[in-house]
Amino acid sequence: QKEVEQNSGPLSVPEGAIASLNCTYSDRGSQSFFWYRQYSGKSPELIMFIYSNGDKEDGRFTAQLNKASQYVSLLIRDSQPSDSATYLCAVSYSGGYQKVTFGTGTKLQVIP
Amino acid sequence: DTAVSQTPKYLVTQMGNDKSIKCEQNLGHDTMYWYKQDSKKFLKIMFSYNNKELIINETVPNRFSPKSPDKAHLNLHINSLELGDSAVYFCASRSGTEAFFGQGTRLTVV
């Protein structure tokens, strides 16, 4: 059974701190990894994607991928109250039309 | 213009009824999905179509029947609604990297 796992949280961090969100996946054939942000009552929106081992930075966001450990993380620097949301990790498996499987999400609360 | 639009946004109905949710995308994408998000925020794939052809059909009761009249539309029909069907249903379309989601349809079965 292919799975994507996340700690459901809530993860509480003070404003200005670094928030670290983690995700593990079970299928070694996974090729693409995504982080979506979902505000309460809204639809998910893509904030980062990563294909290769290592780090990928975009503004305050850094995605980290370690395929050997089957682990992907998202770091949010200088966390803002507006970052408070649920963060969904998603994995696209190899072959076919790339079914995208989501984790259960981690709720982040940034405390002013 | 809304990229992926779903209607209705809210749907309240009684057990045993049949209902449909419509989805349209104007992005020119070939692939469209239906996802179900439960109260714990778990987003589970139900179906995927590529160019009107069903390519992913997860373990979903056959009361759920998707229909894609063309590659810009993917509708979801649900027969004999049950309490456990209450959830938010998201339509999404994808080309390449990013999946774009509709605003969701909150279905409440009473």
Image (spheres, rainbow, N blue to C red):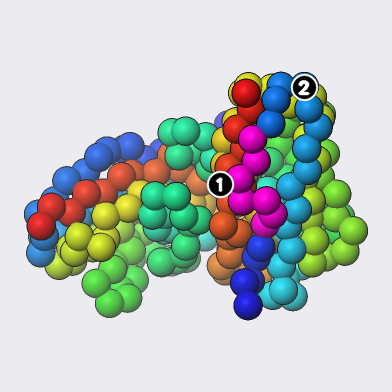
Q: Total number of numbered labels?
A: 2
The residue wearing badge 1 is A101
What residue is at 83 percent from the left and 65 percent from the top? B71
- C-alpha distance separating marks 1 and 2: 30 Å
Q: What element carries label 1?
A: strand
The residue wearing badge 2 is B16
Residue B94 x %, y %: 65, 65
Question: Looking at the image, can residue A67 be seen?
Answer: no
Task: Find the magenta span and give its range.
Answer: B6-12
Residue B37 x %, y %: 54, 40
Q: Residue furthest right?
A: B69
Numbered label attached to residue A69: none
Horizontal placement of A108 versus B79: left or right?
A: left
Chain of the residue where label 2 is placed in the rendered structure = B
Q: In this view of the protein, which residue sits in the foreground, A36 or A34? A: A36
Q: In the rendered image of this protein, does residue A13 appear above or below residue B97?
A: above
Residue B73: quadrant of the picture:
bottom right
Q: Does the magenta stretch include residue A105?
A: no
What secondary structure is the stretch in magenta mostly built from? strand
Mark 2: few/some/many CA within 10 Å (<14, 14-19, 20+): some
Which amino acid, by three-letter code, is at mark 2? Gly
Horizontal placement of B98 versus B49: left or right?
A: left
Which amino acid, by three-letter code, is at mark 1? Thr
Residue A8: quadrant of the picture:
top left
Q: In this view of the protein, which residue sits in the foreground, B8 or A35? A: B8
Instruction: Identify the image quadrant of the N terminus of chain B.
Output: bottom right
Chain of the residue where label 1 is placed in the rendered structure = A
What residue is at 27 percent from the left and 55 percent from the top? A84
